[in-house]
Image: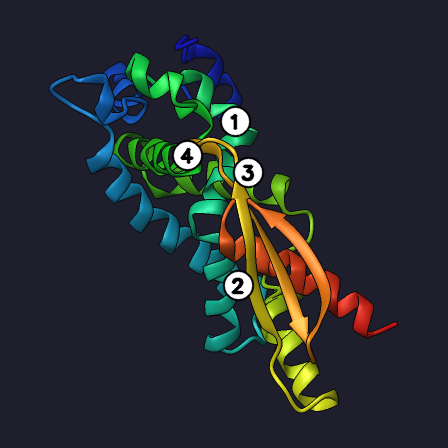
Amino acid sequence: MNDYSQLEKRLNYTFDDKQLIIEALTHKSHKKPYNNERLEFLGDAVLDLIVGEYLFKKFPKSNEGILSKIRASLVNESGFTLLARKLNLGSYIFLSLAEENNNGRDKPSLLSNAFEAIIGAVYLEAGLEVAKEISIGLLEECHPKIDLDSLSQDYKTALQELTQATHGVTPLYEMLGSSGPDHKKEFEIAIILDGKTIAKAKGKSKKEAQQKAAQIALKELKR
């Protein structure tokens, strides 16, 4: 697609220096003298600060440990991928034909990096306040509820604590298999407790499948 004027409308920000937005949208596979890696580096630091300040003000009574956990649940690849998809960012990225054919426009790592680069570019040209307005606006669109319970549910830890209390053991996670092409693999995990399978789930990564299975297992055990 690459007509980034629509992206500027969605951001509610128009770049004076068009080369900045072009660079922010250019993946290294595109084989230009520039790519978005440096802007991504900058954007990562800017977003860390923006989200940190936002949480500091939003939760005046929360301690450093709680704030760090909430920030970690927002400032990561999956968090930024969510914001990138809200912008339909994959449609605007400049990348090679090979990367495009490899489902590059929907790769979490590529989308997350491009989002960081866009925020880095906005920060460079317009400063922290404008970058903050865009970032927090998107954050609140994607997360109507921002707190530790809704964002940082670690189902594996919760399941381990429950089973140790009720059964005196830690559940086992067994890999059942994987399917799909390399760029779009799906993993299936089973949870074994006292020799019995208590839950199964699939995910785009082993970690995601484990968390989903743990969530199912928690519901079953709490019945």
Q: Nearer the viewer, mark 3 or mark 2?
A: 2
Asked if the residue under mark 1 is in contact with the one under mark 3, i.e. CB atoms within 8 Å, the reply is yes
**Which sits earlier in the primary sequence, circle 3 or circle 1?**
1
Amino acid at pointer 4:
Asp
Q: What element carries label 3?
A: helix
**Which sits earlier in the primary sequence, circle 3 or circle 2?**
2
Q: Is residue 162 left or right of residue 24?
A: right
Residue at numbered disc 4: 182
Going 28% across and 38% down the picture, which residue do you hit? 40
Amino acid at pointer 1:
Leu
Residue 176's spot in the image, x, y percent? 58, 54
- In space, the residues marked 3 and 1 are separated at their CA atoms by 9 Å
Residue 75's spot in the image, x, y percent? 44, 53
- The vertical placement of 218 against 187, above or below, is below
Residue at numbered disc 2: 70
Amino acid at pointer 2:
Ile
Q: In this view, does 172 lie to the left or right of 8?
A: right
Tell me the quarter of the picture where residue 214 sits. Answer: bottom right
Q: Nearer the viewer, mark 3 or mark 1?
A: 1
Q: Judge whether residue 12 can be spotted in this image.
A: no
Q: Which of marks 4 and 1 is in front?
A: 4
